Every structure is written in C-alpha cells, then in structure tokens.
C-alpha cells in the first residue's frame, strides 16, 4: 500500500527518486574513499626509511613462499628464508642484480633501498650474507646491515592521516587525534585544613591531659 502511494503520486515518486540517487552517490563516494585510503595505507606501510639519503624507498612484496624464498646457485634450488635475511639474486646472465629481504614474514624486493645503501653482496650464495637488524634483534654469525627500515612510525601515520583528512594541526590539541590529559589538581590545597585539624586535635589532647592532672581536694576529716 505504501509503495503504491509513492508510485501513484508524482511528487512523492520524484522525492523518492531523488532520495535514492543521493544514497547511491553517498555509497559510491564512501567506497571510493575507502578504496583510496586502503591503497594509500598500503603504500605507506611498504616504504623503508633510509639513513643514507634521509628519505624513503619502496619495497615490493614478492609472490614467494618463505620456505622457498632464497635461490642458491650452488645447490640449484631455493632455500628457506628467515626473518631479517638480506640477500641478492642475479638474472639476465648476471647483468641484473636484485636484492631481497625477509620482513614481516614475507619476501620483499628492496633493490631501491639496497642501491642507496651501496652494500656489495655476492648473488645466489648458499649462506645468507647479511641480516637486517630491527632494534636489538640480530644474528651473531652474520654481518649486520645498519637499517632504519622499520615500518612507518606513529608520528608518520599521524601526519599521513592529517593529510588524508586535510586536518589542520591547529584545530587539534598538539596536532594529534588524542588530546593531552589535563594535569591533576594540586594535592597541597587541602594541607591547611589538615594542619588545622591536627592542631585542634593536639590542643584537645593537651587540654584533656591538664584536666586529668587536676586533683580533687577532699575535706580533711578529723
């Protein structure tokens, strides 16, 4: 009945069509925004900081199983890669060298970052020549490549979200999404009252002591 009333009435039908068009446009805009946000987040997370040029380099995820992540020319097969492994592989009859690393449980092509580091690695070796260290982690038997290639920090993600939403740091406390907690109220405001109560109590105690010291004089019986 309600649907028939909308269809039969030209004004209600036009209003209904406008409402449906607005909902469709809103849904499309939201889907486009979420898709763009997902792509931008993926791009941010797939960048590596460089301590040489103080910039950032892209890393590209490879479709490789970590259990068969490294190619070994000596054995003519792939070996398993461990977290932090950093190695090189050759292609095009040795004319092209590609650098790889095992990060976050996945194999990445980090040739762009390695080229800026200027680290000389022999390709297709049996053993892993280098180990990228994140923080305090490392390997004693392997050479360690100094790296600031950890994922994007909280400050970088904060700046990224500000740019995405066109945020103005002046509109937010300290330019962050989370406000700074207010300092606690000073606790010495109640000190005078507490001290006065102590004085009163001590005065009452001293007064009671004086009362106790008074001796009741009884009449001398002859």
Image: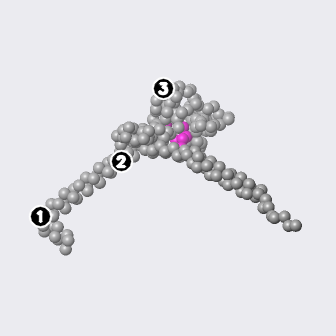
Residue 53: mark:
3
Q: x, y percentage for residue 69?
A: 55, 42
Label 3 with label 2: CB-CB less than 8 Å:
no
Kindly report the secondary structure that dominates the magenta region of the rendered protein: strand
Mark 3 falls on what kind of element? loop
Q: Please give the residue where the numbered disc 2 appears in the rendered image.
A: 35
Label 1 with label 3: CB-CB less than 8 Å:
no
Q: How is the image coloured?
A: one colour
Above or below 93: residue 204: below
Q: Residue 218 sits in which quadrant?
A: bottom right
Along the line of sight, the residue nearer the viewer: 68 or 1 = 1
Q: Dot 1: few (<14), some (14–19), or many (≥20) neighbours within 10 Å?
A: few
Label 2 with label 1: CB-CB less than 8 Å:
no
Q: Dot 2: few (<14), some (14–19), or many (≥20) neighbours within 10 Å?
A: few
Which residue: 56% across, 26% down?
120
Q: x, y percentage for residue 132?
A: 58, 35
What's the distance in space between the residues labelled 1 and 3, CA to CA?
66 Å
Indicate whether residue 218 is drawn in magenta.
no
The magenta region covers 101-109
Q: Please give the residue where the numbered disc 1 appears in the rendered image.
A: 10
Which residue: 15% across, 67% down?
7
Which residue: 67% across, 55% down?
204
Which residue: 62% across, 37% down?
136
In the image, farthest residue toward the front: 222
């Amino acid at each position: 009945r309600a649907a028939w009333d909308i269809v039969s009435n030209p004004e209600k039908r036009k209003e209904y069509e406008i409402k449906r068009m607005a909902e469709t446009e809103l849904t499309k805009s939201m889907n486009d925004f979420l898709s763009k946000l997902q792509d931008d987040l993926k791009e941010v997370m797939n960048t590596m900081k460089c301590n040489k040029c103080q910039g950032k380099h892209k890393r590209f995820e490879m479709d490789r199983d970590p259990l068969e992540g490294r190619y070994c020319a000596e054995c003519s097969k792939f070996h398993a890669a461990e977290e932090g492994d950093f190695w090189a592989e050759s292609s095009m009859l040795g004319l092209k060298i590609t650098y790889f690393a095992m990060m976050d449980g996945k194999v990445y092509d980090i040739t762009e970052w390695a080229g800026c580091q200027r680290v000389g690695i022999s390709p297709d070796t049996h053993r892993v020549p280098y180990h990228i260290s994140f923080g305090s982690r490392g390997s004693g038997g392997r050479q360690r490549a100094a790296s600031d290639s950890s994922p994007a920090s909280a400050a970088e993600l904060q700046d990224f979200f500000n740019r995405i939403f066109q945020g103005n740091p002046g509109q937010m406390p300290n330019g962050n999404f989370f406000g700074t907690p207010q300092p606690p109220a000073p606790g010495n405001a109640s000190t005078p009252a507490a001290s006065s109560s102590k004085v009163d109590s001590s005065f009452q105690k001293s007064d009671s002591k004086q009362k106790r010291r008074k001796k009741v004089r009884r009449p001398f019986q002859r």
